[in-house]
Amino acid sequence: MDRSDATHDFLLIQGTLLENKKLFLGNLNHSATKDQVREVCEPFGTVTDVIVLEGKGFGFVEFSSVEEASKAKAALDGQDFLGRPLKVDFAKPRTDRGERRPFKRF
């Protein structure tokens, strides 16, 4: 794979080029389960991890290779899944949000 043509498949973090095998799935039906998400993604490759944030409408799927993740992104973005069109993109790495202030009720 020519890395210059696939900048979205790789992340540049502190000068290091890393393969991005993890996809963000947005606009999930709030009733979607890990098993349902895994089932819709498995035709595109080996799924190594699935995270679905219950009731939040999004999750993450990690594949065993960048090529598999790219195929899944191309095929699933905009496709209907449990009555809603999926928004699929390469996941961005978590950033350190620093120390959080405690929540105060008035």
Image (cartoon, rainbow, N blue to C red):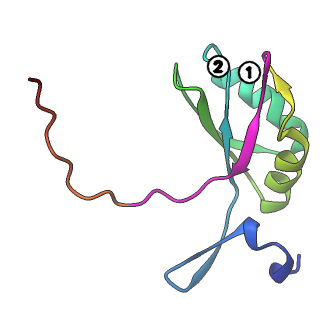
Residue 64 numbered mark, or none: none
Circles 1, 2 touching at the beta carbon (< 8 Å): yes
**Amino acid tagged 2:** Thr
Residue tagged 1: 36
- Residue 87 inside the magenta-drawn segment: yes
Q: Can the viewer see residue 55?
A: yes
Asked if residue 79 is positioned above or below residue 72 in the image, the reply reads above
Q: Bounds of the magenta span? A: 82-95
Label 2: how many Cα within 10 Å (few below 14, some 14–19, many 20+):
some
Residue found 82% across the figure and 72% down from its top: 6
Residue tagged 2: 33
On-image quarter of the C terminus: top left
Which of the 4 image quadrants contains residue 44?
A: top right
Horizontal side of 24 relative to 14 (left or right) equals right
At mark 2, the secondary structure is loop
Q: Can the viewer see residue 50?
A: no
Residue found 82% across the figure and 83% down from its top: 4
The location of residue 98, given as percent across then percent down, is 25, 59
Of residues 49 and 59, the one nearer the viewer is 59
